[in-house]
Amino acid sequence: MAIIAQNETSEKKSLNFIEQKIEADLAEGKNGGKVQTRFPPEPNGYLHIGHAKAIAMDFGVAKRYGGVCNLRFDDTNPQKEDTEYIESIEHDIKWLGFEWANVYYASDYFQQLWDFAVWLIKQGRAYVDEQSAEVIAQQKGTTTSPGTNSPYRDRPVEENLRLFEFMNSGKCEPGTLVLRAKIDMAHPNMLFRDPLIYRVLNMPHIRTGNKWNAYPMYDFTHGQSDYLEGVTHSLCTLEFVEHRPLYDLFVTWMKEWRGETEHIEDFRPRQTEFNKLNLSYTLMSKRNLLALVQQGMVQGWDDPRMPTLCGFRRRGYSPESIQKFIDKIGYTTYDALNEMALLESAVREDLNSRAIRVSAVLDPIKVVLINYPEGQTEMLTAVNNPENEADGTHEVEFSRELWIERDDFMPQAEKKFMRLAPGKEVRLKNAYIIQCPETLPNGDRPYEMDAEGRVTTVYCTYDPDTRSGLPGADRKIKGKTLHWVSSHNAVKAEVRLYDRLWKVENPRDEMAAIREAQNCDAVTAMRQMINPDSLTVLKDCYVEPFAATMPALSYLQFQRIGYFNVDTDSTPQCPVFNKTVGLKDNWQKK
């Protein structure tokens, strides 16, 4: 039975090319009219934003067409895999807003894959090779010249079976024996030139323990796992285009092994490739991200400068904003470098509707209202989010002494300076109009400076009739509206400002160029590209008490400054905030 997306006339135009293929398969009744996908990460690191694009596709199409999406861990390499990564992957998928139907592991199929490999040996389609990896690579030939057969290609079946068993005995030295599929050493697709399908590791597995010492290779595992699991649409990135014919061949052989030769084309997984998510000023290889962590160039996988999902979460990106970004860039069959500014615009758009507005001063100078009664305070009302009335309000304290931003005051201001300066008026957000006089009543200048010439205190007067809500609040002035916090109850806070981690727009290509030019390793190249100003920590900031009570990972807008997030290091006594993104795009300036 064909399943077509609802409202076909209007939605057909918005279908991406993968969805169009799925609808065509459903219309033809392939795979019994069902859709089943899977997200198959290797548990050897934390998920990054590139994985989010695959997650959105795998889970999204399954949901759209009434199917299921399974989570399957590709745990075929025990050298790099860990339960820590499994737990983090599950957490990140749920944080993005998706739920899997079942959790599977490639290791669930190890016995079936082994039995299948034995059948291939008996069929004369696989053989044990004892040449070194270097020799095997040389014998593969080139894209313009055929390969040469291994001297072990025609080894007797019985001997292959005996050696294959020996590969899993724990007594075989890793690297001395491999199992290869016997296909065609002259095939134009290099992957068909007798690919390796098993290698020896002699290493315990996080799930199967010491049962296996020989492990299947990715190309021999992936398609068969899809097939055994019932996957109808295997969605992956463009580097697997060349792997697709091998994927299809191994699935065909497995169906033959299982005696399922009828309707072979109607009931099989269909691999479709789409472009990766590439971001400017971002490096997303898990191998390189691991090196950053291990070499101490960042403060862990969830460092807010990292492109990992846990890093973006800690920095203050919402899962909805990431999905909006993915929707904007779409899915194609060619790779492109997406601008970080586009991601930040999606984040800014989303946080505008969900962030709670609070006041914070990052570089404070004190304002003393000389005509405000000493010892008096009053509580004013602040709207939590003007975009969402349901978020309510909270109270802020107003007092004689306040903190404002240093760049909101100039001792000698030009005419176009619309903030506070001698002789100028400004409005304080949710409060009063204040004025800095030209001189104080005793003739002194209206501000104090330290020994280094930095302003420390500004003296002003306030107009008591201009508080928000009073008739005088409508009085027009030329000055801007400034944010502030009361110094009487302000909470000292740490604020972390983040910039791009890399100095170059395309760190992947730049790293390759540096390594080639200098004959150095990846870590040495990365150290030359890393931005020394990617993190600035401000220790002497002030926030209103309401902001200090917010739980970790809360979405906030520091008024007039930008969007911020409560860091996981934060406590009510020592609050810590991470800058997520500014109120305006500043990438073009950079």
Image (cartoon, rainbow, N blue to C red):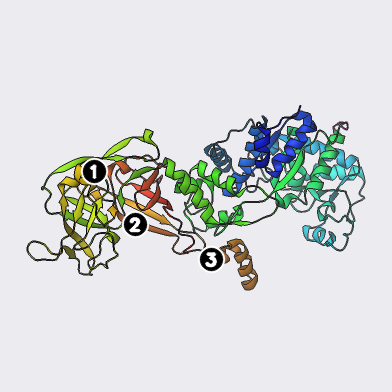
Residue at horizontal 36%, vertical 45%?
A: 570
Does residue 527 show up? yes
- Dominant SS type (magenta): loop
Magenta extent: 258-262
Q: Which amino acid, mark 3?
A: Met
The stretch drawn in magenta includes residue 489: no
Judged left or right of residue 283, residue 236 is: right
- Judged by depth in the image, the label closer to the viewer, 1 or 2, is 1
Few, some or many residues within 10 Å of mark 3 (<14, 14–19, 20+): some
Residue to which mark 2 is pinned: 538
N-terminal of the pair, mark 1 or mark 2, is: 1
Indicate the position of residue 342 as horizontal and vertical percent values. 53, 53
227, above or below 324, in the image: above
User: Circle 3 is placed at which residue position?
Assistant: 529
Residue farthest bottom in this picture = 517
x%, y% of residue 227?
A: 77, 35
- Counting every numbered tag in the picture gives 3
Image coordinates for residue 222, horizontal then vertical, percent? 74, 42
Could you tell me which secondary element the residue under label 3 belongs to?
helix
Seen from the viewer's position, the closer of residues 254 and 208 is 254
- Residue at the spot of label 1: 468
